[in-house]
Amino acid sequence: PTPSSGNIMVTNGDYRLVPIGQTNHRLFQAKYQGQWGSVCYSGMGSNVASVMCRSVGLEGNSWASYSYSYSIANASRFSYMDVVCSGLENDLGGCSKIPVDSSSWSSSSCSVPQSNSVSVACEEPLNITFRLQYGGNSGTLLATVNGQEGYVCDDFF
């Protein structure tokens, strides 16, 4: 799978990313007791978002961002809330979480899947280096971004 799959769902068995419209974020869903459901935003952090990306096979040097501010029409139920990950897990199965049918489930913080569900954006980081064109302490600044070198514009320095 690739992070820039357009309107294609990215899936890996028990986890999937579902397109949610004109955004690079995708609704993260986990299969729980045979049904797909989203993850409530309670307890959410960047470590969890990174593990969510790895859960669907977007591995390597990916970084992830998350949101829960989108109105997500295709989020109809939750699978988990209060997910906590160290950031080193291979998938969400290695993280602590509260399942939807637990007696600990808090409907007050996770009552509306359409607005309380987590969406994530999984991206490959840019590899950027800088150097002065002729070395030394001053001169023209050059940037190499993912192997391509170019001049740095000074319009906002």
Image (cartoon, grey):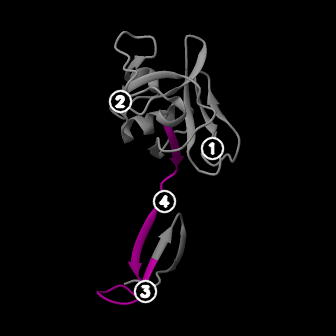
Q: Residue at x 38, y 27 (%)?
A: 83
Question: Viewer-nearest of labels 4 and 3?
Answer: 3
Within 10 Å of disc 2 (Cα), the crowding (few <14, some 14-19, many 20+) is many
Residue 108 picture location, percent across and down = 37, 25
- The Cα atoms of the two marked residues, 4 and 3, are separated by 21 Å
- The Cα atoms of the two marked residues, 4 and 2, are separated by 24 Å
| Residue denoted by label 3 | 154
Type of the residue with mark 2: Cys
Confirm or deny contact between disc 3 and disc 2 (CB under 8 A).
no
| Residue denoted by label 1 | 2
Does residue 17 lie above or below 66 as drawn? above
Does residue 154 lie above or below 101 as drawn? below
Mark closest to the chain's N terminus, 4 or 1: 1
Within 10 Å of disc 3 (Cα), the crowding (few <14, some 14-19, many 20+) is few
Left or right: where 114 falls relative to 64:
right
Q: Which mark is residue 126?
A: 4
- The Cα atoms of the two marked residues, 3 and 1, are separated by 34 Å
Magenta residues, as a range?
118-142
Residue 72 picture location, percent across and down = 58, 38
Q: Is residue 77 magenta?
A: no
